[in-house]
Amino acid sequence: MGNPVVYFEIGCRDSSKTAAFFAQMFGWDGLPEGPAVSIRTGSEAGIQGMINSLGHEPYNYVTFYVQVEDLQVALDKAESLGGKACVPPMEVPGSGHFAWMSDPEGNTIGLWKPLQP
């Protein structure tokens, strides 16, 4: 069985302004969390996400997160297939760990490993 897409992230310079756009465009609810806004797409069938203002490059990006068993193993596999590790495994306190990789064409994809219950 494959690895599921579990989350999305939209990067921007102004998370409040960007969240307001998507609220009007798609009816998404947002909850401010520091420089980010957690997004609830309003559907049980849809994945949830975040609008994020990193405060540095990249400012504008859209990525999705794929859940994996082991972030470093996934990054190593991506590199063996011609991709690249972009962001090493990092902790999201209370949630899990993430990393970023790129495919051979330069598209950024997030990797996610949730905390085990």
Image (spheres, helix red, strand yellow):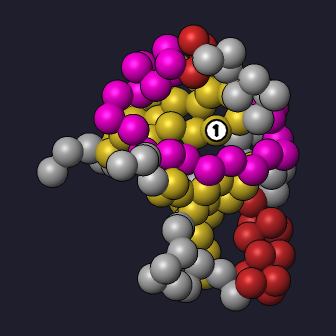
Left-right relation of 88 to 71:
right
In the displayed structure, 23 sits above or below 80; it is: below
Secondary structure at badge 1 equals strand
Q: Position of residue 96 (x, y in %)?
A: 35, 42
In magenta, the rendered stretch is: 56-77
Q: Residue at x 62, y 27 (%)?
A: 101
Q: Position of residue 63 (x, y in %)?
A: 68, 47
Q: Nearer the viewer, residue 28 or 83?
A: 83
Q: Which residue is mark 1?
A: 109
Q: Where is residue 115, by image quadrant? A: top left
Q: Nearer the viewer, residue 86 or 14?
A: 86
Magenta-drawn stretch contains 63:
yes
Magenta-drawn stretch contains 67:
yes
Q: Position of residue 49 (x, y in %)?
A: 57, 62
Q: Position of residue 24 (x, y in %)?
A: 80, 86
Amino acid type of the residue tagged 1 in the rendering: Ile
- Residue 84 visible in image: no
Q: Residue at x 36, y 49 (%)?
A: 1
- Residue 74 visible in image: yes
